[in-house]
Structure formats: structure tokens, C-alpha cells
Image (tube, rainbow, N blue to C red):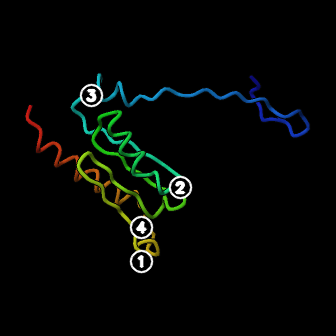
Amino acid sequence: MPTHKIQSGGTAPNIQLQLVPKLLAPLVNLWVPHAFVVSFKLETDENILITKCREALNKYKHKLVIGNMLQTRRTRVVFVTPENNYELVLSQQQVHNGIEIEETIVSNVVGQHNNYIKMQKY
């Protein structure tokens, strides 16, 4: 493996990619089964976003999937839980004021996590 940048006069690089195993299943089932686990789902087709989020919830049995579209990822996300789903959308004013969607995401996740902790009976 070269340690320096690829020279422009050289031949085209041959790149091999390998799939990375998903860690959600062992995380939820073995390591921290009572944790408030959140995953993210990015899609390019609006018609399958909620379905893919629900499939992830059913497959991995975690608490929340935050889904978004590649095209609107900076201004709109959808929170999908086993019970329901709802959207977080930045207003034009928020965008103009430099608010980033991550601030809204974090405050919502913190709220859901706090509710989850209150509901737990250990």
C-alpha cells in the first residue's frame, strides 16, 4: 500500500471495497439491551423512507430511527418509533438565522431519552 498521494501520471487505481457488518443487532440484543439506541437512515426515495425506518426498527428492535432524505437532509428529518412517527422541519427563518437541524435533533432525542428513563422499571 503506497504511503503517498496517487500520482496523476500513474495508472488508474484498483480499489476493492468490503461490506462492514452491522453492529445494531449485537448492540441491542447482547451488549446493552435496555439502552435507548438510535439509528439513522438516509434515503434518496421519499416513497420508501418510512418503510425502511420501520423495517430497521422491526429487525433490530431498538427505540428510534431518525430518517432523512439526501436532498433535504439539512432542513428535514423524520423520527420513527415503534409507536409513531413525526417530522422535524426547519423554518425558512431558522435556516436564515443559521440554525442547524442537528440542534433540533439533539434536543428531541434528549427529550425522548429522558421519557424513556422515567418509564423504566429496574
Q: Residues within 10 Å of mark 2 (few under 14, many from 20)?
A: some
Q: CA distance from mark 4 to mark 1?
A: 9 Å
Q: Which mark is residue 93?
A: 1
Dot 2 corresponds to which residue?
70
- In the orientation shown, which residue stands out farthest toward the left? 121
Q: Residues within 10 Å of mark 4 (few under 14, many from 20)?
A: some
Mark 4 and mark 3 lie on one chain; the one further toward the N terminus is 3
* Secondary element at tag 4: loop
Quarter of the N terminus within the rendering: top right
Q: Disc 1 marks which amino acid?
A: Gln
Mark 2 and mark 3 lie on one chain; the one further toward the N terminus is 3
Q: Residue at x 28, y 48 (%)?
A: 81
- In the orientation shown, which residue stands out farthest toward the right? 9
> Comparing marks 4 and 3, which lies closer to the viewer?
3
Q: Disc 4 marks which amino acid?
A: Ile
Q: CA distance from mark 2 to mark 1?
A: 21 Å
Q: Disc 2 marks which amino acid?
A: Leu
Can you say whether 82 is above or below 5 in the image? Answer: below
Can you say whether 82 is above or below 2 in the image? Answer: below
* Secondary element at tag 1: helix
Mark 1 and mark 3 lie on one chain; the one further toward the N terminus is 3
In front of the other: 72 or 118: 72
